[in-house]
Amino acid sequence: MTPRDKSKAQLQTELHQAQEKIAALEAIEERCQLAEMELRQQNAFFHHMLESLTHPFYVLDATTYEIVLANSAARMGDLSASSTCYGLTHRRSTPCSGSEHLCPLQEVKRTKQPVIVEHIHYDINGNPREVEVHAYPIFDDQGNVVQMIEYSLDISDRKRLEQEVQDYTEKIKHFAYSVSHDLKNPLIAIHGLTTLLQKKYRDRLDDKGRIMCDQIVKESQQALLLIEEINTFIKTKETPFTFEPLDIKAILAQVRQEFQTALSSQQIEWLEPEAIPSIYADKLSMLRIFRNLVDNALKYGGSELHRIAIDYRATADYHVWSVSDDGVGVPTAQMEEIFGAFHRGSSAQGREGSGLGLAIVQEIARKHGGKAWAEPGQPCGITFYLSLAKTLGQ
């Protein structure tokens, strides 16, 4: 091969290599164009998604508080390159100090966890609005919070309704206390005077008069019981509980002693576990629960009642108590209704009671992080269950 032919061969090789490089570059350019198109589509979708949100959405710089990204619902006008979250939403020149409310960005940086706080933001017309701010951290490779995602929900209407409900509840409580106070003293007087009338003048009354006196004494006593139960029900809802370690065996012993006369006269067997662990609960509340459930069994168990059994079991999260009896029971359809305030079933006819006992039990269970429910007994009667959260007192 002559030098000239060799040079020509080299040129052909170099040309072939150049053509391959050009083809590779064209392929890279094509992939870049596809990637750019895909990125534009993703950006368009992301932009469309943000603009579809009806509540404000931001991305904030964790150091400068500047708004890096915001949707139309958040902008409330043009945003400059240095617009800050506190300038836009609070109409102020410095970040929130924490004296008015918790700053979500400061809290996210401190905890490195998502947070939810309530704030007062101002709308485009300068009107204050109560909002619920949801904030989420964005981290760098070293785990530092560099940005924060924030969106806020306007809860002004919800807060207004909550305040109206609270005001209405306070009015009802005030009315209930006032009525119970105003009625209690006259009822005590009626009950006392009628009892005195029975004691001193019973022999001078005819049969009809004695029956009427007996009825007045009975009904006034029932009215006094109802007033006391209403006050207890209200206090159960409003009074803070004191959660302390309790010896339930001692509480059951006290309740059993209180009902010993009725238990003995009706020859009712009392059963309870030999060993019961100490639990955290409110002492007065636990006394009320067992009093109400035992009293309920004695009042409504009927002639079939021969046994009251108290049992305990534990789950991963709850202490669960049960109070069973073998009395007449309650129809399955009424199992949920019996916990309603002032509900009295068919078996309660002719018996004293306010219809608030089980409602009080339900409310106490709720304030102990649990619930109360009932199930048909086996093979007869009824079983009441009560769950209390194990986390109380922690």
Image (tube, rainbow, N blue to C red):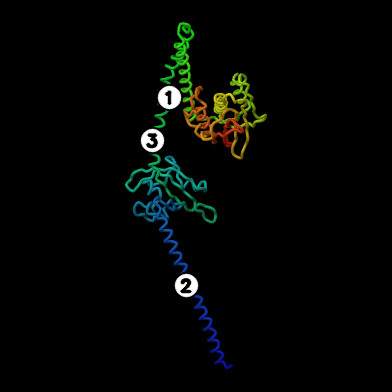
Check disc 3 and give the amino acid type.
Glu
> Mark 3 against mark 2, which lies toward the viewer?
3
Residue placed at 50% from the left, 52% from the top? 145
Say which label, 3 or 2, has the lower sequence index. 2
Q: CA distance from mark 3 to mark 1?
A: 20 Å
Which residue was labeled with disc 1?
177
Say which label, 3 or 1, has the lower sequence index. 3
Q: Is residue 55 left or right of residue 273?
A: left
- Tell me if I can see residue 193 in this picture: no
**Image quadrant where residue 379 sits:** top right
Which residue was labeled with disc 3?
164
Q: CA distance from mark 2 to mark 1?
A: 81 Å
- Cβ atoms under marks 3 and 1 closer than 8 Å: no
Q: Is residue 126 left or right of residue 66?
A: left
Residue extending farthest to the left is 125
Which residue was labeled with disc 2?
30
Which quadrant is home to the N terminus? bottom right
> Mark 2 against mark 1, which lies toward the viewer?
1
**Image quadrant where residue 369 sits:** top right
Q: Nearer the viewer, residue 306 or 72?
A: 306
Residue extending farthest to the front is 207
Q: Is residue 231 above or below residue 104?
A: above
Check disc 1 and give the amino acid type.
Tyr
Could you say whether the residue bearing mark 1 is in a helix, strand or loop? helix
Disc 3 residue crowd, few under 14, some 14–19, many 20+, Cα 10 Å: few
Disc 2 residue crowd, few under 14, some 14–19, many 20+, Cα 10 Å: few
Check disc 2 and give the amino acid type.
Glu
Where in the figure is residue 390, as x and y percent of width and height? 59, 36
Could you say whether the residue bearing mark 2 is in a helix, strand or loop? helix
Could you say whether the residue bearing mark 3 is in a helix, strand or loop? helix
